[in-house]
Amino acid sequence: MKALILSGGTGTRLRPLTYTSAKQLLPLANKPILFYIIEKVVKAGIMEIGIIVGDTHKEVKETVGDGGRWGAKISYIHQPRALGLAHAVKTAANFLGDSDFLMILGDNVFSMDLDIVIRNFYANKANTTILLHRVDNPSQYGVAVVKDGCLAEVIEKPKNYISDLIITGVYVFDKTIFPAIEQTDPSARGEYEITDAIRKQLEMGGKITYELIRGWWKDTGKLEDMLEANRLILDELESEYPITAFPGSLISGKVIIGENVTIKDSIIQGPAHIDQDTVIINSYIGPYSSLGKRVKIEECELDNCIILNDTRLTGINKRISKSLIGRNVSIRGGINRRPLINSFLVGDNSEINL
């Protein structure tokens, strides 16, 4: 079995950050989203991985490499235009050949192991197995109707309620998906939808089974979902820091602190992840915060934030919360105004004076 990871999307809902960075490389607990997916694939025993890339192909290749760090072999498949998930599969036809393959969207993170889905696929001699999840707002996703352990119907973003089961972006396919894609027409938005290809598979007599998510799952396409995924991952961490290294500061809860970090006269309340060479002075770092490399925080309070590398926050007299702040950003404090809270979605190389 091979794996196909889709990392060609533009991340429009996370702009301006995604003008300068691939959304699949944005960090959760200071590790790129794409790395979590690759780790899950390798843990499932799949070592041949193809990554679909688009305009951000250079950054993805430089960050991920050839797969050697995971003991895997990674190939890159360029999709010149984002014409839908089914089109991405077709683009990867030469890489996939006649192999069964696992396909995952590159902005999905989840806690369950992938071998559960793979076992379902082989145990039931399925043509396709899909990972499903129950949600309260299914109309924004591909929605599945199931019967007797198999998929009976699938519709992309239905206008009327048909089910609360959504397609998460984790699939296992055999080679019969290719003739189904060949008979699939573009949707109203001009894309070749994988849901339409799966429906065509059903019409052609294919057997499509499903598994339900065990544990948590997040599509990290929006700010609130990025922050929630960061919280979920931080909750799973174990503390790693030298207790005696930060005199005059109070550190409590689950906290990971990297090398050469300076913390003076500050309070760190975990869960939190602080990467190497970061400096924190006379500040409060609250729960569910991830600070990247070489970040400097001085005379600030923050919680529930993702702060990327080389950013500087200084003298801000309102707490920063529910924020995703890009690389090399500078935010300096100003006049005291109420309410005493700030929330930001700030792209790379920005400067804000409050």
Image (tube, helix red, strand yellow):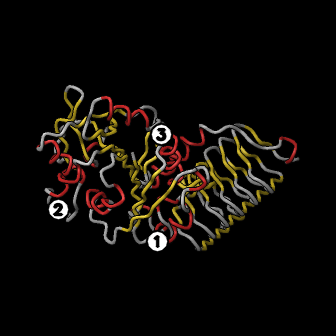
Crowding at label 3, few (<14), some or many (≥20) Cα neighbours within 10 Å?
A: some
User: Pointers 1 and 2 in contact (CB under 8 A)?
Assistant: no
Label 1 Cα neighbours within 10 Å, binned few <14 / some 14-19 / many ≥20: some
What residue would you read off at disc 1?
19
Q: Position of residue 256 (x, y in %)?
A: 71, 45
Is residue 157 at least partly visible in the picture? no
Amino acid type, residue under disc 2 in the picture: Pro
- Image vertical order of residue 295 relative to residue 124, above or below: below
Closer mark to the observer between disc 2 and disc 3: 3
Secondary element type, mark 3: loop
Asked if 39 appears above or below 95 in the picture, the reply is: above
Q: Look at 42% across and 31% down and name the residue there.
A: 214
Q: Residue at x 65, y 62 (%)?
A: 336
For the N terminus, which image quadrant? top left
Residue 60 image position (x, y, % from top left):
50, 65
Residue bearing the label numbered 2: 186
> Which of label 1 and label 2 is nearer to you?
2
